[in-house]
Amino acid sequence: MTVVLGWDIGGANIKLTVIRCRGYAVSDVKIFAEYFPVWKRGREKLPYKLKSMVERVGSIRPDLAAITMTAELSDVYFSKREGVNHIIDSVEKAMPTLDLRFLDVHGRLLTPDEARKHPLEVAAANWYASGWLASKLSDTCLLVDTGSTSTSIVPVVEGKVAAKGLNDLEKLMAGELVYTGALRTNVAAIVSHVPVRGVSTPVSSEFFAQSGDIHLLLGHITAEDYTVDTPDGRGVSMVEAAARVARVVCADLDLLSMEEVKTIASYVYEAQLGQILEALKRLTNSLKVDLKTSPAYVAGVGGEFIAGKALKMFGFKDVKPLSRFIGSEAAKATPSYALALMAAEFLKGRELRNWRLS
């Protein structure tokens, strides 16, 4: 049996996929995800968190661990270079005996020493794994992954990942990265005004409410899906979420009714869809092919109610949840799952069977 790990080390969430293979076929997949805001918990604790997650794999020694990261953008690091090097060090401390490989923006799996020589090519390369996975489903397609924090839009053309941007800055400029997500986005980063009793009302720029509150109120997520810290440190009941949203306009539930708060939430949701639509317009205008006639795959915790809705509004006809092909848990951890599969095929030297459900 061959065992491969695929890590996606984010600044707020760490995801681990364990793929077991018998011969050239995938026999088992397990997904682990833990909320770990590195700026709160401390960068020095990262190796111990990684080690504790490895211990959940069991007694079988993995043959290979492949890693991608976005945590280097956290402001606990002065620069991406510092962040990448610290994450590499943390991975080596957590898994000192394993064969380690780090994904870069060209789809290469680099050794730790190679990764240290090219830190800016290793930084935020997780989108490549997602695009690579999509290319196994359709030669030409679009993958839109809306996670807790951001949305990654990856074009695939003629079997190749066709992203224009190779780092976060370039991807923001190209419409391939939108800093809007299903849980952690500050409402004040989505809208500057909201409707209150027919009046367009400015919002406070404080971090009073986040997108998780919006989607909880609208029924897009459950309390169990709300896996991140709340802005006020309180719970994730409907009333607590409504109180946070009311505070965005410097009000509370004595001043605003639940109905009025939900009206605000609906407006914020439409504005969030608008952020995705703007990025889709920018991206598709720069491509030589019309991706609207090709399949679009959606993934992440906000895949269907944010990414999928925006794609349909934009004119995509064939929008498919990635969960249909890899399962719901894997679709919420797409880069981790895709990287584990990529690493397994790298190790085996050929494509694997039985990785897709349909």
Image: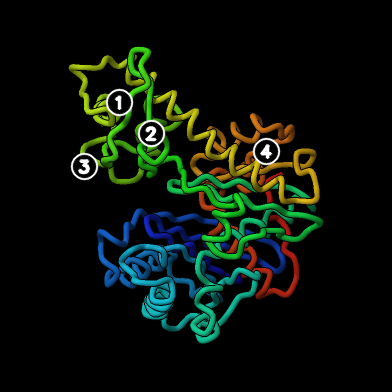
Q: Position of residue 172 (x, y in %)?
A: 54, 54
* Between 348 and 93, the one nearer to me in the picture: 93
* Residue located farthest toward the left when viewing the structure as drawn: 254
The x, y position of residue 51, in whole percent, is 36, 70
**Residue shown at the point (50%, 39%) measured from the top left:** 302
Near mark 1 (Cα within 10 A), the count class, few <14, some 14-19 or many ≥20, is some
Residue at which label 3 appears: 233
Query: Could you tell me residue 128's position as x and y percent?
Result: 62, 62
The residue under label 1 is which amino acid type?
Met
Tell me the distance, in whole angstroms, between the alpha carbons under discs 2 and 3: 24 Å
The structure residue drawn at horizontal position 40% and vertical position 55%, both measured from the top left corner, is 13
Give the label on residue 238, or none: 1
Task: Check disc 2 and report the residue beneath it.
Answer: 192
Query: Label 2 is placed on what type of residue?
Result: Ser
Image depth: mark 2 or mark 3 in front = 2
| Residue 115 left/right relative to 130 | left
Q: Nearer the viewer, mark 4 or mark 3?
A: 3
Query: Is residue 258 positioned above or below 91 on the image?
Result: above
Q: Earlier in the sequence, mark 2 or mark 4?
A: 2
Cβ atoms under marks 4 and 1 closer than 8 Å: no
Q: Is residue 224 visible?
A: no
